[in-house]
Image: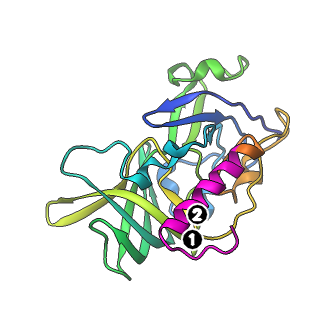
């Protein structure tokens, strides 16, 4: 089935993102059915957030910034390996990761597996209740329920890949919680990725074509700027990323 891409303005805290409307060939599925990375590919996304501003504040979480829940939370940065284990809800999701290198903050021990909670993920909104519905084509009925992938212009972490992660952490009860601040990209793939730019004409692409991207960008310049910022962060933390 043909699909369409639509950019929209999206300003949340320190990050500015835009939405791209992408229709997948695959059938729809509820978020709570997503347990593995391949399950994400089975979802027919109508809207995918796309990064539209690659400035330093895009990576504010790696500078100790980003929106924190309250003063009990503190920043934490580490390198981890993404596992093929997802738990998705309508407003957040968690992914199992195994820590490979501690960098700063109250990090888990090397080799420890934790569930990293992410604000955002897979949402569903009726068009008439969707905040940015004015950017959507008029021929979509107001009653249509939209399936939205909102990850600040990022993809889900790919199982087996190593990532630099910036998160917030606090002790809740007898355990420690790790979650990403909302409003800025919080994980960066140490592997080389051949991201596809979202420049195809409307109604001529589907999400499956971009499912292997690390970043969702609408221009080559945006992607190049993000990769340059990513490389500088890797250099700062002494990470080996020779392919960047």
- Tell me: residue 140, above or below residue 176: above
Q: Magenta stretch containing residue 173, yes or no?
A: no
- Tell me: residue 84, above or below residue 117: below
Q: Position of residue 82 (x, y in %)?
A: 51, 70
SS of the residue under disc 2: helix
* Residues in magenta, as a range: 222-244
* Among the two numbered marks 2 and 1 on one chain, the one whose residue lies closer to the N terminus: 2
Q: Magenta stretch containing residue 234, yes or no?
A: yes
57 or 86: which is nearer to us?
A: 57
Left or right for 166, reference 152 = left
SS of the residue under disc 1: loop
Placement of the C terminus among the 4 image quadrants: bottom right
- Name the residue beneath numbered marker 2: 37
**Separation (CA) of disc 2 from disc 1:** 7 Å
| Residue appearing at x 42%, y 34% in the figure | 13
Question: Does the CB distance between marks 2 and 1 fall below 8 Å?
Answer: yes
Crowding around mark 1 (Cα neighbors within 10 Å: few <14, some 14 to 19, many 20+) is: some
41 or 94: which is nearer to us?
A: 94
Crowding around mark 2 (Cα neighbors within 10 Å: few <14, some 14 to 19, many 20+) is: some
Q: Position of residue 181 (x, y in %)?
A: 38, 48
Q: Position of residue 236 (x, y in %)?
A: 49, 66
Q: Say how many tags the image has.
A: 2
Placement of the N terminus among the 4 image quadrants: top right
Left or right for 185, reference 200 = left
- Name the residue beneath numbered marker 1: 159
| Residue appearing at x 63%, y 51% in the figure | 226
Visible residue check, residue 42: no
Q: Residue furthest bottom?
A: 111
Q: Position of residue 27 (x, y in %)?
A: 68, 48
142 or 5: which is nearer to us?
A: 5
| Residue appearing at x 71%, y 39% in the figure | 22
């Amino acid at each position: 089935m043909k699909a369409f891409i639509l950019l929209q303005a999206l300003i949340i805290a320190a990050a500015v993102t835009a939405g791209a409307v992408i229709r997948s060939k695959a059938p729809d599925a509820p978020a709570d059915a997503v347990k593995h990375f391949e399950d994400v590919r089975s979802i027919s996304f109508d809207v995918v957030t796309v990064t539209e501003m690659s400035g330093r504040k895009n990576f504010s979480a790696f500078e100790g910034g980003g929106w924190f829940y309250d003063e009990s939370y503190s920043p934490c940065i580490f390198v981890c390996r993404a596992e093929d284990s997802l738990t998705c809800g309508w407003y957040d999701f968690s992914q199992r990761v195994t820590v490979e290198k501690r960098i700063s903050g109250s990090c888990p021990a090397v080799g420890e597996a934790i569930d990293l909670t992410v604000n955002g993920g897979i949402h569903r909104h009726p068009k008439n209740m969707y905040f940015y519905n004015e950017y959507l084509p008029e021929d979509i009925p107001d009653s249509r329920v939209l399936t939205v992938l909102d990850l600040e212009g990022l993809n889900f972490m790919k199982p087996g890949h190593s990532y630099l992660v910036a998160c917030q952490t606090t002790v809740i009860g007898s355990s420690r919680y790790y979650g990403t601040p909302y409003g800025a990209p919080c994980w960066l793939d140490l592997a080389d990725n051949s991201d596809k730019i979202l420049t195809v004409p409307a109604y001529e692409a589907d999400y499956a074509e971009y499912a292997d991207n690390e970043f969702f960008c609408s221009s080559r310049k945006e992607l190049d700027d993000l990769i340059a910022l990513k490389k500088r962060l890797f250099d700062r933390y002494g990470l080996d990323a020779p392919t960047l």
